[in-house]
Image: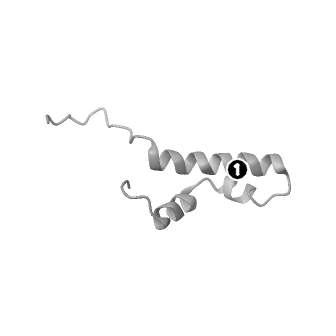
Amino acid sequence: MGGVITAERIGQLIEDAPAWAKIALTVPQERLREDAKRELGQHIYAALFQPVAKDAAQLALPL
């Protein structure tokens, strides 16, 4: 699911993020909240900006 960055896309990525990170955003311990923010940010960043892994079995098409 690539393409345009929209509020709906970001919302879906938050929904798909690890449950522990979403829960840890609400805990009183600052260190856990910081870890959760970092994990959530990394999850969203990777989905939006990291290249999709190529399937080694897929043949490349000539351009």
Residue at the spot 37% in from the left edge and 53% down from the top edge = 2
In the displayed structure image, the side of residue 25 where residue 63 appears, left or right: left
Residue at far left of view: 62
Residue tagged 1? 36
Count how many numbered circles sit on residues in the image.
Answer: 1
Per the image, label 1 sits on a secondary structure element best described as helix
Q: Which quadrant, please, contains the C terminus?
A: top left
Residue at the spot 30% in from the left edge and 32% down from the top edge = 56
- Across and down, in percent, residue 13 comes to 52, 58
In the displayed structure image, the side of residue 30 where residue 54 appears, left or right: left
Q: Which quadrant, please, contains the N terminus?
A: bottom left
Q: Quadrant of residue 27?
A: bottom right
- Looking at this view, is 63 or 59 the one in front? 63
- Across and down, in percent, residue 62 comes to 14, 34
In the rendered image, the vertical position of residue 32 relative to residue 10, given as above or below:
above
- Across and down, in percent, residue 23 comes to 72, 59
In the displayed structure image, the side of residue 54 where residue 24 appears, left or right: right
Q: How is the image coloured?
A: one colour
Q: Residues within 10 Å of mark 1 (few under 14, many from 20)?
A: many
Q: Amino acid at mark 1?
A: Ala
Residue at far right of view: 28
Residue at the spot 32% in from the left edge and 37% down from the top edge = 55
Residue at far bottom of view: 8
In the rendered image, the vertical position of residue 42 relative to residue 56, given as above or below:
below
- Across and down, in percent, residue 48 comes to 46, 50
